[in-house]
Amino acid sequence: MVKAAEVPEGVEQPPIELTPRWRGRRRRVHHNPDGSRAFVPCSTEIGHNVIIDPKAKIGEGVKLGNNSRVLHKAVVGNYCVLGTQAVVGMRTELGKRATLGPKVRIGRDTNVGEGVQVGRDTNVGDSCQLARGIQIGAFCELKNGIEIGEVAIIGNEVVVENGVRLSSDVRISDGTRVNPREAKKANDEAAAYLNR
C-alpha cells in the first residue's frame, strides 16, 4: 500500500484542480496573480507570475517563462516556448513550435507562423504577418503592418519600418534599417539568388 507524502504541520499546499476531459485532453486550472483563472493543458510548464488571459488558448507542451503574459484571445500553438517576460498580444496567434526569447513583445492581431524564432528584447508590432520558419535576431524592432515570407533571416539590431513586405528567403544583415526601398532591393536579391 502506497501512502501519500505527509505535509509538515503549518505548511499549506496549493490545491491542484483538474478539470474533466476537454476534447480528449486533460486540462488544469492556472491561477493568475490577479485572481483570474485560465484553463491550460496538463503538459504546460508555467513559470512564476505568469498571466494567461481566461480567453486565451494554450496548446499542448507549451513552456511559459517567468513573468510572461498571454493576453486576451491570443492563441499559443503546441510546443511553443515563451522566454522570461515575453508578451503575446491580444488576438495574436503563434504557430506550433514558435520560440520567443526573453523580453520579446508581439503586438496585437499578429500572426506568427510555425517554427518562427525571435531573439531576446525584440518588439514585433501590431497586425504583422510572419510566415513559417523565420529567424529574427536579438534587439530588433519590427514596426506595424509588416509581412515577412517563409524562411527569411533577420539579423540582430534590425529595424523594419511600417508596412514593409519582405519575400521568402530574404537575408537582412545585422544593424540594417529596412524601409520600403531597402525591402525592394532585398527582395530583388533574394529573387536573383533563387532564379540562378
Image (cartoon, grey):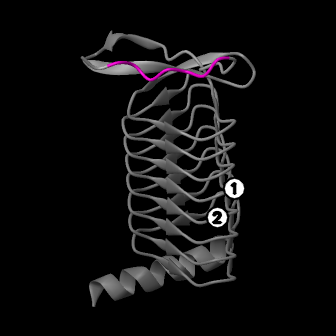
Q: Nearer the viewer, residue 138 or 132?
A: 138
Residue 5 inside the magenta-drawn segment: yes
| Rendering coords of residue 2 (x, y %) | 28, 20
Query: What residue is pinned by disc 2?
Result: 120
Q: Magenta residues?
A: 3-9
Counting from the top left corner in percent of width and height, residue 186 is at: 52, 80
Mark 1 lies on residue: 103
Q: Which mark is residue 173?
A: none
User: What's the amino acid at mark 2?
Assistant: Arg
> What residue lies at 49% left-to-right and 50% top-to-bottom?
81
Which of the 4 image quadrants contains residue 51? top right
Q: Which residue is outermost to the top?
A: 20
* Numbered disc total: 2
The amino acid beneath tag 1 is Lys
Front position in the image: 2 or 121: 2
Residue 119 picture location, percent across and down = 59, 66
Quarter of the picture containing the C terminus is: bottom left
Secondary structure that dominates the magenta span: loop
